[in-house]
Amino acid sequence: MQNSPLPSPTVGPAPEASPPSRLQGRVQHYEWGHRGDASLVARLSGAGVDQTLPYAELWIGTHPSAPSTVLPGGMLLRDWLARNPGALGPDVAARWAGDLPFLFKVLSVAKPLSIQAHPDKGLAELLHALRPATYKDANHKPEMAIAVTEFHALFGFAGIEELKDVIRTVPEVVGLIGREDAKKLINFKGYHGGNDVRSLLRSAFTKLMASSKEAASEAINKLKYRLNDSSKIRTLTKKEELVLSLERQYPEDVGVLAALFFNYVKLSPGEAIYIGANEPHAYLSGECIECMATSDNVVRAGLTPKYRDVQTLCSMLTYKQIFPEILQGVPVQPYVRRYSPPSDEFEVDCCFVPPGEVVVISSAPSLSIFLVLTGEGDIQVDSMLHGEKAKEGDVFFVPSNTEVKLSACVHASMQLYRAGVSSNPCMSVTLMLQAKRSQLESIYEITS
């Protein structure tokens, strides 16, 4: 990520044991968030809550769009890290130029977010250079969402049989993508190569998303009236109910029809999904913990009043037809589950501390950020005699190579989430090999 330049860090040892630093995150009042106290973000923010405002996201990190500050005093976390690079851990400080490589968030989704995708690093650099006002940094944005409540999302393209069913039963879609593309999809045989179906899907989806506003509006209204009539004589499918719900919130938006092309995903609390580069998705409802590489790059094309970059979105997508893997987290010790996505920048632990219990989090070679989601207790580092009081909404920064003791009060449990840099030692090699393979495939396609 290319922010304002920092001097090259002189990496020394991590600071001596001291109380964990408190952080103040920043709230984003996007229109799709829950309003007032109905929002988890509002309840965690710790400030006076305006019941008329949407509280959509809580950001914890160094991204310049909403940087966190260190308390007391209010120094920007990025500036604090520049002065204390040892807190990051030597490898992290050296690799990411003394900056925090991940952005930690809480989301409270009342209304569907845009149909979107996040660019890979190469495309992010290009978009930032061409349109810095829209694409505010040059970093990629792999991300993971962990459900706090029941969470609904669209993610990735549905399988070929489901898409064939859309073509057969939704004439409004056929009218926008054209009969030729519709016929090719219907006649596609599973034994053909994967690139064949991706090419067909790309053509059909691009035509749908590039439809004129008038044509999309007419098709959506026809579909709405037809489904409303059908609901009087049969039970609508979940996808059909979703289409009607989206239409009420985003009338005449082509994203209403695009939703039929995607997998409809429901997460229970504690379940998670990982979203890699160039994969289409849209969060629909619910609350979640989210972690990602430090970036705010979003390419949008539907279900939004914001800027739409249809051409870029349709050209960047992988067009893979896979249902997302639902991550459950892996126990790494009693009361701690770890979510380790295929990303160098981050991992997330869910820590549950029973009433009156103490949970010891082993020291990590890189920094950690703890967010108290529920309950209250203490957070103590290394051999300090006294810890810091911790309650719902508190955020703590813990330097590298620092053992942490978490204790809950005797009356109730305490739940925390810890974000840190990936501890998977093989991750860098794996990603490097994947990048080299993609590069070789691109060269082969160009020269063939």
Image (cartoon, rainbow, N blue to C red):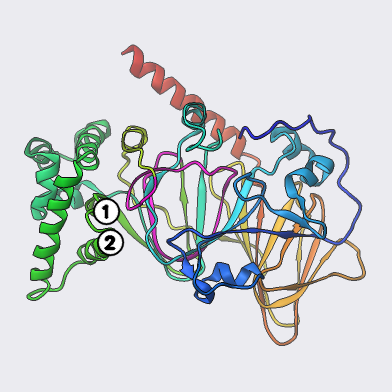
- Residue 293 in the image, given as x and y percentages of width and height: 58, 44
At x 32%, y 41%, the residue is 320
Distance from Cα at disc 1 to Cα at disc 2: 9 Å
Amino acid type indicated by mark 2: Leu
Residue 383: in magenta span: no
- Residue 27 in the image, given as x and y percentages of width and height: 59, 60
Amino acid type indicated by mark 1: Ala
Labels 1 and 2 touching (C-beta < 8 A):
yes
Counting residues from the start of the chain, the first of labels 1 and 2 encountered is: 2
Residue 279: in magenta span: yes
The quadrant in which residue 443 appears is: top left
At x 57%, y 60%, the residue is 330
Q: Decide: few, some or many residues near mark 2? Use Cα within 10 Å; few <14, some 14-19, many ≥20.
A: many
Residue corresponding to mark 2: 246
Q: Residue furthest top?
A: 447
Q: Is residue 165 visible?
A: no
Q: Magenta region: which residues?
A: 277-306
**Drawn side of residue 195 relative to residue 421, left or right:** left
Mark 1 element type: helix
Residue corresponding to mark 1: 259
The quadrant in which residue 46 appears is: bottom right
Tag nearer the camera, 1 or 2: 2
**The C terminus sits in image quarter:** top left
Mark 2 element type: helix
